[in-house]
Image: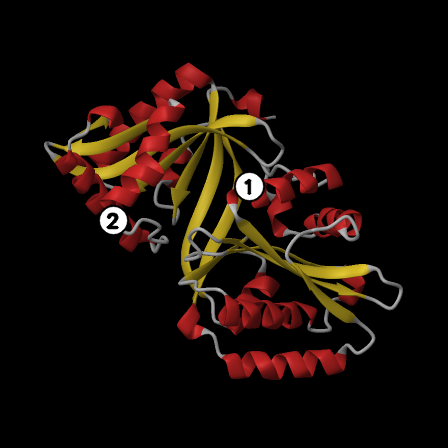
Amino acid sequence: MNIKAIDISNLTNTAFENLFSITCRIADKYGLLKRFKNADAYQNLFLSPLATSGDELFVIEDDTTICGILSFVKSADWSGKEQYKLTIYICDPIPNQPIIDCLSQLIDNKLQQHEEFAIITYNNELNDLITKYPHKVNLKANAYTLTKKDIDIGLINNALTTYQSKNNDLRMIYTDTISEEYIEQYCNLFMETQEDMPDVKEAGFVRYALTPEKQRQLNDSNTKRNFTHHCYMVFNSANEMIAKTNVSVNNNNPQFPYQFMVGVKQQYRGRGLGRWLYAAMYKKLFEEVAFEKVLVLHHPENNHMINISEWIGYKYSYLETTILLSRHKQSLQ
């Protein structure tokens, strides 16, 4: 058993096909979204950009059998700080000791090179390995997916009528970009509701500072990449934004929209605003977007939002954990 670095620029067509096949097996194991339709898409959308960025791809091999795929890439965290991330996918249902030993050796080598990096694992399958190192949890996220066929449009229409009548002192609006009219309130609401997220309890959690300038940059990025930012907002009679929900859709490939940043001001909770927002959003997506599955991530302790997601039809897929590893415990202080 060994871990081998892959030279993407010199892979044969057979090797591309093999890596794609293993990637599909891994997606089935964990319940990941199958973002690549075929080996060509896998090569063009994942492997080729990885090669040109200077990031690394590894496989775990037992003789000539691939037992896992690992990527070691440099990217920015929510605060904009760049860090390396090692993502580990294991083919077998339970990683055996030879695989654990190989991973331990790779982690040791990377810690010698970089002192600290993030490691992404799934379903707690590498907990025993991780706990041997100085570490702290950055993010825990249960991934849930909603297939279009599981949307109950009757449930949605009834919910829209019910929650509108219960909240006739409020108004809901839709927008496909966060315009100057709403941008300051939008950012303020995000920052306020972020403090209530269970994520902030994690020792390594990095707060995302959403400012109007940063949102303007996101607006520009969405335009350049042909993404639509679907957003529903709720306002009170004083025209104060008190709730919102968001879905991002890649119009070049709308298969897998991403649900994110749901928030309700504390004093307005308990009025069903989360379900009202979800009903409006998923009626729009159902009627206007040719998607396959929507993805949402919730901290495992965010029971309120998990209940709302399951109410609309989401089903649990996997647990993803991002952990900061360090060569020295004091560097994590």
| 130 to 249, vertically: above or below | above
- Find numbered disc 2 in the image and state the secondary structure of the residue it sits on: loop
Name which residue lies at 41% across and 20% down. Answer: 111
Q: Disc 2 marks which amino acid?
A: Asn
Give the mark nearest the N terminus, 2 or 1. 2
- Find numbered disc 1 in the image and state the secondary structure of the residue it sits on: helix
Q: Quadrant of residue 41?
A: top left
| 228 to 286, vertically: above or below | above
The image's mark for residue 96 is none
Name which residue lies at 41% across and 29% down. Answer: 73
Q: Position of residue 19 (x, y in %)?
A: 21, 39
Q: Which residue is mark 2?
A: 38
Q: Position of residue 206 (x, y in %)?
A: 62, 37
Q: Is residue 66 visible?
A: yes
The image's mark for residue 224 is 1
Name which residue lies at 51% across and 47% down. Answer: 140
Q: Disc 1 marks which amino acid?
A: Lys
Q: CA distance from mark 2 to mark 1?
A: 26 Å
Estimate how packed mark 2 is, as few (under 14), some (14 to 19) or many (20 or more) residues with alpha carbons within 10 Å: few
Q: Name the residue nearer the viewer: 9 or 2.
A: 9
Q: Name the residue nearer the viewer: 317 or 187.
A: 187
| 2 to 140, vertically: above or below | above
Q: Kindly indicate whether the residue at mark 1 contacts the one at mark 2 (C-beta within 8 angstroms).
A: no
Q: Nearer the viewer, mark 2 or mark 1?
A: 1
